[in-house]
Amino acid sequence: MSGQQRQHFLAGLQEAMAGLSSQGIEVLTLSVTEPHIDQASSHHFMGVWRFPDQRACQALLAGIQASGWYEYFDHINAAGAQGEFAQHLLDLANV
C-alpha cells in the first residue's frame, strides 16, 4: 500500500476498534516486540487482549479477518483461558 492508502486503512481500523469496549473487550497492550530477548519472536508487533467470553474473542477475530488485515501483515493468533501458575505446571506435565 502507498503511505496514503495505509493511513486510510489504519484510520478505518481505529474507527472499528472504538466499539470494542462496549463488548467487554479490553486491550492489555499493543506494542512493538523486544527483538533482543531470549527466544524472541520474529514478529515486530504484538497485541494482548482480554475477553469476557469466547463469543467476544471470536467477534474480534472475525473483524480482523473481515478488515483485510491478513492480506497486508504477517499475523498469528493464540488464545487461551486465564490461568494460574499451578494450573500451568499441571498442564505442562500432562503434555
Image: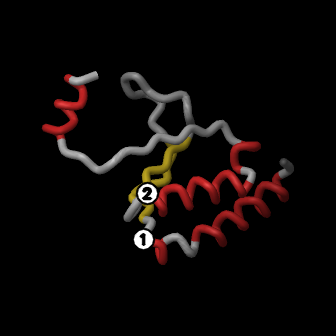
Crowd rating for badge 2 (residues with CA inside 10 Å; few <14, some 14–19, many 20+)? few
Under mark 2, the amino acid is Gln
- Of residues 79 and 27, the one nearer the viewer is 79
Secondary structure type for disc 1:
loop
Residue shown at 47%/40% (left/top)?
78
Label 2 and label 1: CA atoms lie apart by 11 Å
- Of residues 91 and 44, the one nearer the viewer is 91
The percent position of residue 95, horizontal first and vertical second, equals 28, 22
Under mark 1, the amino acid is Gly
Q: Is 89 left or right of 32, judged from the image as shown? A: left
Question: From what the image shows, is residue 42 above or below residue 30?
Answer: above
The residue that mark 2 highlights is 54
Residue shown at 43%/44% (left/top)?
79
Secondary structure type for disc 2:
helix
Q: Is 61 left or right of 7, judged from the image as shown? A: left
The percent position of residue 81, horizontal first and vertical second, equals 33, 48
Q: Is 49 left or right of 12, judged from the image as shown? A: left
- Which circle, 2 or 1, is nearer the viewer? 2
**Residue 44 quadrant:** top right
Question: From what the image shows, is residue 92 above or below residue 85?
Answer: above
